[in-house]
Image (cartoon, grey):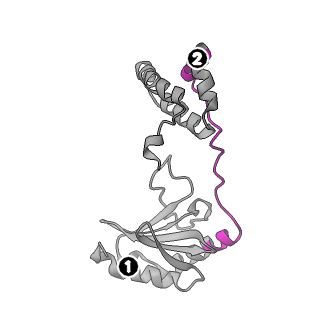
Amino acid sequence: MKNEQWTKEIALLKTLVEQTELEHSIKWGIDVYTYNGKNVLGIAPFKSYVGIWFYNGVFMKDPKDVFINAQEGKTKALRQWRFNSLEEIDSQTVLAYIKEAIENEKAGVKLVQSDPGQFEMPEFLEKALTTDPALNKAFEKLTPGKQKEYAEYISSAKREQTRLERLEKIKPMVLEGVGLNDKYKK
């Protein structure tokens, strides 16, 4: 274990999870607990805390107001609960949260991802597509996901000059039928 200082905290959290029907596995190098093959929660040490996170925590009641969204604006469903010491772990409360997460999983409560084809076309890109028929035709042939990547890439630029530079950068890629992030996907 990387962070030896969290040994007792992790052992206690694991003991609590073991009182349930969740199955243990190692995913992404951490302890993940599943129900019928679906991720319910994970436990891992960090430098300044040990965390338990609930993959669909956004749907949990959180009466103690302990949940953190680690990446606001990016993370949709996952919620973390961080502990800085063994004394912070109230076994009864943690077990109640774990049981609620299991019940939610049994009930099929989960976040439905939006259709990757649904996105807002930035006006700047739309103008470029209407003035360049070849670019428009190539753009329409792209998958909805690739179209969305390009639209978000253009719309995330704050300055008009940056949008123009990005548009010039992506034109050859769109004409080739390549996605913005294809070189990173395998």
Image: 24 above or below 46 = below
Q: Is mark 1 on a helix, strand or loop?
A: helix
Q: Position of residue 173 (x, y in %)?
A: 48, 29
- Residue type at mark 1 is Glu
Q: Where is residue 134 in the image (x, y as percent from the top left)?
A: 59, 19
Q: Earlier in the sequence, mark 1 or mark 2?
A: 1
Q: Alpha-carbon neighbours of circle 1 within 10 Å: few (<14), some, or many (≥20)? A: many
Location of residue 61 (image quadrant): bottom right
**Which of the two residues, 61 or 52, is positioned nearer the viewer here?**
52
Image: 47 above or below 10 = above
Q: Count the marks: how many? A: 2
Q: What element carries label 2?
A: helix
Q: Alpha-carbon neighbours of circle 2 within 10 Å: few (<14), some, or many (≥20)? A: few
Q: Residue 178 carries which label?
A: none
Location of residue 44 (image quadrant): bottom left
**Which of the two residues, 58 or 64, is positioned nearer the viewer here?**
58
Which residue appears at 50% of the width and 83% of the height? 16
Q: Where is residue 143 in the image (x, y as percent from the top left)?
A: 61, 38
Give the magenta part as a residue range. Answer: 102-130
Which residue appears at 56% of the width and 65% of the height? 62
Q: Position of residue 81 (x, y in %)?
A: 46, 66
The residue pinned by badge 2 equals 127
**Which of the two residues, 19 or 163, is positioned nearer the viewer here?**
163
The residue pinned by badge 1 equals 9
> Is the N terminus in the top left, top right, bottom left or bottom right quadrant?
bottom left
Q: Distance between the residues labelled 1 and 2?
A: 57 Å
- Residue type at mark 2 is Lys
Which residue appears at 35% of the width and 82% of the height? 8
Image: 94 above or below 141 = below
